[in-house]
C-alpha cells in the first residue's frame, strides 16, 4: 500500500460548503433512494453504493477538519501491507497466517492475502473485542464493583 502517482490528498479548504453538505448527508436516510450525481452538463448518473459510501467517509472527515488521502489499494496484499492495515508487525501477521486465521497463497517465496480476507478478519477481531468488553462490564456490574 505504497504511495503511487494516483494518490491524492484533499484538504478541508471550503469549510462552509463541506459543513452544508455534511448536514445534508446526515439528514438523508441512507439506502432509502439511490444517490444521483449531476455533472456540469446536467447529465445524471446513479452512484454505486461503494462510491456513495466513499463520499460519506470523505465528507465526514473533511467536515471534522481532517485531510483525506484517496489512494487505490490492490486487492491482493503483501504480508507487510496487510500488517500495516491491521496495525500489527509483519512477524505478528505471519503468525496469524500460520495459525490459519486468514487464508493466503504462496505463489512463489512470498505470501499474498486478499484484502477482503484481511478486512473480514479485522471485523471479526473488533466484534470479539467488543463482546469481551461487554462481558467484562456485565461481570463487573454484577459483582457490584461500580456501586459506591
Image (tube, helix red, strand yellow):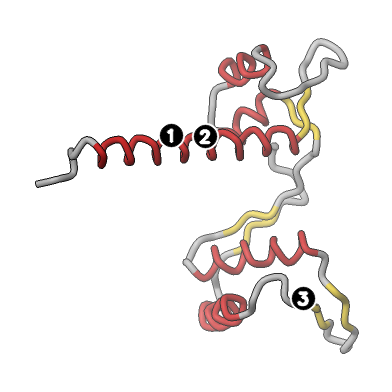
Residue lying at 78% horizontally and 15% vertically, measured from the top left: 110
Tell me the CA gap for discs 1 and 2.
Answer: 6 Å
The residue lying toward the viewer, choosing from 124 and 56, is 124
Task: Check disc 3 and report its element: helix, strand or loop.
Answer: loop
Please tell me in which quadrant of the rendered image residue 18 appears: bottom right
Tell me the CA gap for discs 3 and 1.
Answer: 37 Å
- The single residue placed furthest to the front in the displayed view is 142
Please tell me in which quadrant of the rendered image residue 24 appears: bottom right
Tell me the CA gap for discs 3 and 2.
Answer: 34 Å
Query: Which quarter shows the N terminus?
Result: top right
Circle 2 residues within 10 Å: few <14, some 14–19, many ≥20: few
Circle 3 residues within 10 Å: few <14, some 14–19, many ≥20: some
Asked whether the beta carbons under mark 1 and mark 2 sit within 8 Å of each other, the answer is: yes
Asked whether the beta carbons under mark 3 and mark 2 sit within 8 Å of each other, the answer is: no
Considering only vertical position in the picture, is 134 above or below 91? below
Which residue lies under the disc numbered 2? 128
Q: Position of residue 120 (x, y in %)?
A: 68, 37
- The single residue placed furthest to the bottom in the displayed view is 42
Q: Position of residue 70 (x, y in %)?
A: 68, 55
Residue 132, numbered circle: 1
Which residue lies under the disc numbered 3? 35
Considering only vertical position in the picture, is 90 above or below 98? below
Residue lying at 67% horizontally and 12% vertically, measured from the top left: 98
Amino acid at each position: 500500500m505504497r504511495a503511487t502517482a494516483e494518490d491524492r490528498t484533499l484538504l478541508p479548504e471550503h469549510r462552509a460548503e463541506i459543513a452544508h453538505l455534511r448536514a445534508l448527508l446526515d439528514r438523508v436516510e441512507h439506502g432509502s433512494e439511490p444517490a444521483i450525481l449531476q455533472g456540469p452538463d446536467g447529465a445524471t448518473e446513479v452512484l454505486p453504493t461503494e462510491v456513495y459510501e466513499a463520499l460519506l467517509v470523505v465528507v465526514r472527515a473533511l467536515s471534522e477538519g481532517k485531510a483525506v488521502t484517496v489512494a487505490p489499494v490492490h486487492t491482493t496484499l503483501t504480508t507487510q501491507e496487510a500488517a500495516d492495515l491491521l496495525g500489527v508487525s509483519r512477524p505478528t501477521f505471519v503468525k496469524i497466517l500460520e495459525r490459519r486465521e486468514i487464508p493466503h497463497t504462496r505463489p512463489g517465496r512470498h505470501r499474498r492475502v486478499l484484502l477482503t480476507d484481511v478486512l473480514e478478519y479485522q471485523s471479526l477481531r473488533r466484534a470479539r473485542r467488543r463482546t469481551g468488553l461487554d462481558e467484562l462490564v456485565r461481570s463487573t456490574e454484577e459483582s457490584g464493583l461500580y456501586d459506591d
